[in-house]
Amino acid sequence: MLEVKNVTVRYKNSIGIKNASFIADKKEIVGFIGADGAGKSSLIHAIAGVIHFEGEIIYDGFSYHSPKEAEKIKQNIGLMPQGLGLVLYHNLTVKEHLDFFTSLRGLKNDTKLKEYKRKLLHMAGLLEFTDRLAGNLSGGMMQKLSLICTLLHRPKLLILDEPTTGVDPLSRLELWDILENIKHEEESTILMSTGYIQEASRCDKLLLFDNNSIIADGKVDELLTSAKDYTYEETKCSDECFSFNGYTYSLKPLNAKHKKPTLESLYFINTLKRAKSIPNIEISDRENIIDIPNIVMEAKGVTKKFGKFIANDHIDMVLKRGEILGLLGANGAGKTTFIKMLLGLLPLDEGELYLLGKQIKSGKDRQNLKNKIGYVSQHFALYEDMSVRENLIYFANLHKIPLRETQKKIDRLSTQLGFKNYLDSLAKELPLGIKQRFSVAVAILHEPVVLFLDEPTSGVDVVARAQFWKLLRLLKEKWQISILITTHYMSEAEFCDRVVLLKRGKKIVDDSVKNLSKLNPDAKNFEDIFLKYYRKF
Amino acid sequence: MKFSVIKAYFIKEYIELYRSKVIFILYIMPIMIMILFGYGIKLEVTHAKTIIIDNDNSIFSQKIIEKFLHSKYFNTKVLQISENEALKSIKRAKTDILIIIPSSFEKNILHNQKSEIGVFIDGSFPIRAITMESYVKGVLLDAAMKTATMFGKKMDGLITINQRALFNQAMRDENAIVPGLFGLILLVAPAILSALLIVKEKENGTIFNFYSSPVKKDEFIIGKLSTAFLLYSSAIFLLFLIATYIFSVPFRGSFIIFWFVSEIYVLISISIGLLISIITNRQIVALVVTVIITIIPGFLYSGMLMPISSMKSESYIEAHIFPVMYYNHIVYDTFLIGQGFSSFKNIEYLVILIFYALTILTISYTLLKKEMR
Ligand SMILES: Nc1ncnc2c1ncn2[C@@H]1O[C@H](COP(=O)(O)OP(=O)(O)OP(=O)(O)O)[C@@H](O)[C@H]1O
Ligand SMILES: [Mg+2]
């Protein structure tokens, strides 16, 4: 049993988590949910004994007050920190990772362990890639490799910080099987933070974090009752309220029908309670009016090979003006590879590529296009040790935007995208949701015509994601921007005009969301559609 | 302490070093430093490009010029050009030395009158310039005296410079410089590697694997440090071979002593790196800090540039704070003298070095925390 009593984590000039207390039993999966920067990771680090904290934690009758005292129980702990491939060595292969962690944990490499490793590798879809360097894995594959390295010693206290961020729906289901399995076989206590609402509902118990403390705990239904009074059918409203995707949340009573809240509702309501309002995302008109061709990007038979491995196999794709195109597919399907080729970060092995009506054959053809394309990469790619403002100025400079104008732009974008308060924080100190909005701000500084977004919403909380999609819509409507976006949140696929599904480097579906729903009347949501196509082909 | 954990770290580090090709840089760097500096900081100057303008054209002046023509230290040309032209050629770095023999030079000497020979030297590299200047003086005076005797003249009193100290002694610069390079190279390179090995994990986030696992501090430290230690232990032999074969520095002492004290010294260096890695979080910072705090003392107090005994009070004390001086003393002894442990000072310095290593290791061990900061 795990007992956390009044735990507080302080940083130099801020607080991570205040007076957190909770109890978790054996064979229990406790979900940590809440906004970005609400203190989940701080508490996770304290429990795992990797950061100094105040208060007491008792695990299995053993009490500890500091990382040093926690040393004795570390053989029981498995920690997977937040972040893409954070615990991986990019120059080691998948197999070498498993060997390293086997030794690190002092495990005997007997047949039982070997069998278990096979199972883990299978779950992670890495069985055929054991000789690949971790640095060459796709983002989601890295995440899954980190996860299986953490599971290797079958920890009795498993602590996972957003383990499924960037992991595809199929693997998420398989991961849950493994978690359930460990929970029963090892009688483990599992703590996990997650941004996926379906996952949160599968937890035995939830802790709701907000404003650096735990504000509620209990089973899903118990938490939802508190949200009932604030949740309505989507309607017009003026203050202390927010509408998104068919729902309106309001602190003041509204003259509208109540709607059954979901876990997502909790995020909105808590944010409203804390901040009184959720800033409305706005965007001003394009400053430079330009002619945009009807077809912004066209790929014909685009192919990429890494050695014998074919990452993109003759892909045809079209992106029209003012269209949001969702690029979906399991981890390692080749989404990032495709986007990198569009950007010229990887050379094409075969096929033709047209951007804004011009065929791209060499780097020279891209010269004039630089100012028309915006890109947000899967791995955070801005300067961590510079402040947000400095980053923005730097990138504006790259696009040769005059300084006066830059100042104005920064002011406007940061207000409109709601990160004004963070302008002078270092990029590395930002909560993920803010980081992502700021990445987008950098990507649209120069008012591009087309945006390539590689998992911009992974690990971002519900509210920030809603805001983000509002922003994308606005960009599309007001600026006529075309957007190619990848995501593993199937609910987001529904916001796209059209989706393309990749599987093992091949395109298997290319259709509008409406059509797909019509073709699959029995599917409850887009996740079902995704899984169906993925299993069928 | 679990051997398997240490081994796991050790193997992992080597695979990473090998795949990232860093291992080659680590090996090439020390060799490059040794070869570059071994050849580069030669105090000896040979084949200095020299122009002589002979305005006298006498037997006396011919004799002097002959000396220059026959010396390996000078590449001499006797030209009939104007002084200005010759000076321009120095400015353009085409010429190192210009010597002007005045007219009626011979006459003056024979009449016991003073005569001035003009000497201009390219001063862009002061140390080189000073060396060249003394060579020129040496040759001039030597030649003048010999020629004067030939004419049955004595030049006592007119010549007061001690030519022998300047010139006659065949001093080999390699012997003075190369052993001193050990103290520099083996202080800088292992420290950089060991600092980077740990800070790299902090920067990438993989340090969490250490924080959250039952891996002990000593296992982690030994795993990491043994990587750097082994790599540079082999470098000791390589450097030794370069010194004795390529630079033909004599080795008169005991190899065991040299080897042992070098290992201790490498241990000190990687402990310094460890200490730096504890207080820094970024690779670039760690690199810069390490370079600054190892290269500067590694140079200044190596005894290469200036003997410690002739230092002024502060630098004399500073020299005793850094390990370079102790190590180099023993290294110079093993190479050039060979007293070994019959000299008490060598034993004393070895003990100091061992103490030094243990102290830094203990400090780092205490400061290393298995937690985020
Ligand atoms: N440099 C490389 N060398 C070898 N294989 C590579 C390299 N880069 C990518 N791959 C492989 O290409 C495949 C596709 O990778 P990609 O990053 O495009 O996947 P993805 O669809 O973006 O997945 P995710 O959803 O996990 O981000 C993966 O199997 C990956 O391991
Ligand atoms: Mg990707």
Image (cartoon, rainbow, N blue to C red):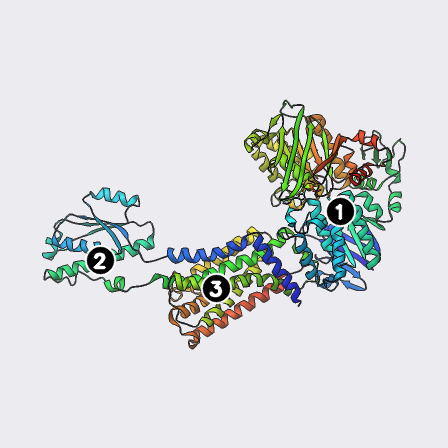
Residue sitting at the far bottom: B342
| Residue drawn at (63%, 23%) of the image | A290
The residue mark sitting in front, 2 or 1, is: 1
N-term-proximal mark, 2 vs 3: 2
The answer to which quarter of the image holds residue A167 is top right
Task: Give the image location of residue A143, x and y in percent.
Answer: 71, 48
Instruction: Mark 1: give few (<14), some (14-19) or many (20+) Cα within 10 Å.
Output: many
Viewer-nearest of labels 2 and 3?
3
Q: Amino acid at mark 2?
A: Val
Q: Are marks 2 and 1 in contact (CB under 8 Å)?
A: no
Q: Quadrant of ligand 1?
A: top right
Disc 1 CB within 8 Å of nearest ligand 1 atom: no
Does mark 1 fall on the same chain as mark 2? no
Mark 3 CB lies closer than 8 A to ligand 1: no
Which residue matches tag 1?
A: A164
Q: Is residue B120 above or below residue A286?
A: below
**Residue that carries the numbered disc 3 in the rendered image:** B236
The residue at 58%/62% (across/down) is: B225
**Mark 3 closeness class: few <14, some 14–19, many ≥20 residues within 10 Å:** many
Of B81 and B297, the residue lying toward us: B81
Q: Which mark is residue B139?
A: 2
Rounded to the nearest angstrom, the CA distance separating label 2 from label 1 is 82 Å
Chain identifier of the residue bearing label 2 in the image: B
Q: Position of residue B152 (x, y in %)?
A: 9, 62
